[in-house]
Image (spheres, rainbow, N blue to C red):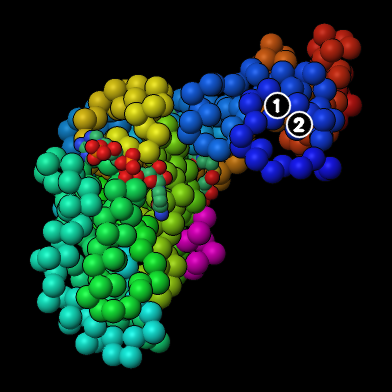
Amino acid sequence: MTADFRHFYQKSWAERVAIVAEQTQLSAAEQALFKKYYLPQHHDIIENYLTDYPLPMGLAVNFVIDGQAHIVPMVTEEPSVIAAASNGAKIVKRAGGFRTTLKRREMIGQIVLEQLPDPQQTAALIESHAVRLLEVADAAHPSLKKRGGGARKLRTRILGAGYLSVDLFVDVQAAMGANMLNSMLEAVAKSIGVLTKTAPLMSILSNYATASLVKAECDIPVGLLQAGRYSGQLVAQKIAAASQVAQLDPYRATTHNKGIMNGIDAVAVATGNDWRALESGAHAYAVQAGQYRGMSCWTTDGQTLYGSLELPLPVGIVGGSIKINELAQLNQRLLGITSARDLERIMVATGLAQNLAAVRALVTTGIQQGHMHLQLKSLALAAGATPEEVPRLLQQLEQAPHQDLATTQRLIATLRRTGSTKKEETDD
Ligand SMILES: CC(C)(COP(=O)([O-])OP(=O)([O-])OC[C@H]1O[C@@H](n2cnc3c(N)ncnc32)[C@H](O)[C@@H]1OP(=O)([O-])[O-])[C@@H](O)C(=O)NCCC(=O)NCCSC(=O)C[C@@](C)(O)CC(=O)[O-]
Ligand SMILES: NC(=O)C1=CN([C@@H]2O[C@H](COP(=O)(O)OP(=O)(O)OC[C@H]3O[C@@H](n4cnc5c(N)ncnc54)[C@H](OP(=O)(O)O)[C@@H]3O)[C@@H](O)[C@H]2O)C=CC1
């Protein structure tokens, strides 16, 4: 790289493409990709914008949540995620659907004070001015109060080593609220600075959104879980056992939780929400009593499988880039939602459906049968197959002793040479 990237952000789009093309020796065809996915309005969303990056969007079906039927748009690059969510949702639908509970929806922000000789005294001083400080918070973003939201509570926590966290709880209404809350926190921090005669270290929302918890539950008669040669009762026992392992072992819990986030992240992206915020909050919440554990819990009494998942899911239906993302808007219509609370309920149910399908597959056929069957399409495309060649290749790949790139490339070569993959079949 020899180019000077100073003020790169002030260059026009064509200038940026020319610089990148020269620096990395891009062909005309490669540069054309930037144009293919370019959306002018996205210059205003991120910095140094070059192009869009397409991800597939599909629909998970069969969801019944609190008595309402839903289709769930999901954006994901991973095969079998949407099939699995639909599969889990179908089982729960037959059992009457998911129930959800959402008690409150507030975001928490922190103002951290440092080097305090007597944190307890500072905490008491701040708490004695709580009413005034809540007014300062509301004045920093008055439209929120007009909408029925606003600052609700102030709490102090002594962190040790001379640090004190002042936590502000805010009802952010239909938004995720990070920016609104940050503005409020910075205003309150100034007042606290004057009050305590110390300059706060920092002010920022916390993604550990414990005041935005939502829970999904389901009760499944074991007969609905039967899979191949496994009775429903046995499948229920094995799912409960897998759930227990995820409570005991962080190695398993991490994968168990990845399966849950397969669903939640895909809905977060489809609705224009900040999936990094959800990921960090969800994993932090999975650390109970000092150990990282499975986020969901499955138990059985031999007749019914009981499932539950509780997570902090601070999402919005306005704010951030949601209003300027046409597909995020359209997806709210597909979901049939008009509030952030509705979106939280659907997301937590999607996580539980996803988890049910994955764990049921793990304890019966194994994950590869269903997952690899769908993954093979990606493998065929990655090996260079045309969409027209994929169906014939899949038939052959299903039979092949090794479902890998080299085998797939050999099958494609044979198909193109002979019009059939038969020869490769005998070669292998
Ligand atoms: C893949 C299935 C669903 C097949 O399962 P199956 O038994 O062949 O499905 P089925 O024929 O009984 O169909 C049941 C329903 O599943 C859906 N379904 C079924 N097939 C499709 C398809 N092709 N496309 C779209 N939807 C599909 C569809 O809704 C269908 O209902 P129907 O439409 O027939 O009324 C099943 O094996 C499964 O759920 N597997 C789990 C796959 C999974 O979790 N994938 C995620 C990637 S692996 C991972 O990242 C997470 C993990 C596994 O590590 C987490 C963990 O360890 O806990
Ligand atoms: N740690 C983190 O997670 C951080 C995340 N972020 C980012 O912050 C963004 C989210 O912040 P957020 O404050 O939600 O977004 P915005 O800054 O966009 O604020 C919300 C906007 O929605 C408008 N609005 C319209 N109707 C409503 C309603 N009914 N309820 C509430 N607001 C309404 C508000 O209008 P009005 O102005 O009239 O009130 C405001 O303009 C995300 O992009 C996230 O990635 C930023 C910093 C840190």
Amino acid type of the residue tagged 1 in the rendering: Glu
Q: Is residue 4 left or right of residue 210?
A: right
Please tell me which residue is depicted at 76% across the width and 31% down the height of the picture: 19
Which image quadrant: the N terminus? top right
User: Do the residues under discs 2 and 1 have CB atoms within 8 angstroms?
Assistant: yes
Label disc, if present, on residue 15 of the rendered structure: 1
Residue 32 in the image: above or below residue 400: above
Query: In the rendered image, which residue does mark 2 sit on?
Result: 19
Q: Give SS at disc 1.
A: helix
Amino acid type of the residue tagged 2 in the rendering: Ile
Circle 2 packing at 10 Å, graded few (<14), some (14-19), many (20+), is: some
- Which residue range is magenta in the image? 249-255
Q: Give SS at disc 2.
A: helix
Counting from the top left corner in percent of width and height, residue 239 is at: 40, 53
Q: In this view, does 178 lie to the left or right of 230?
A: left
Which quadrant would residue 152 be assigned to in this image? Answer: bottom left
Answer yes or no: is residue 30 visible: yes
Any magenta on residue 210? Answer: no
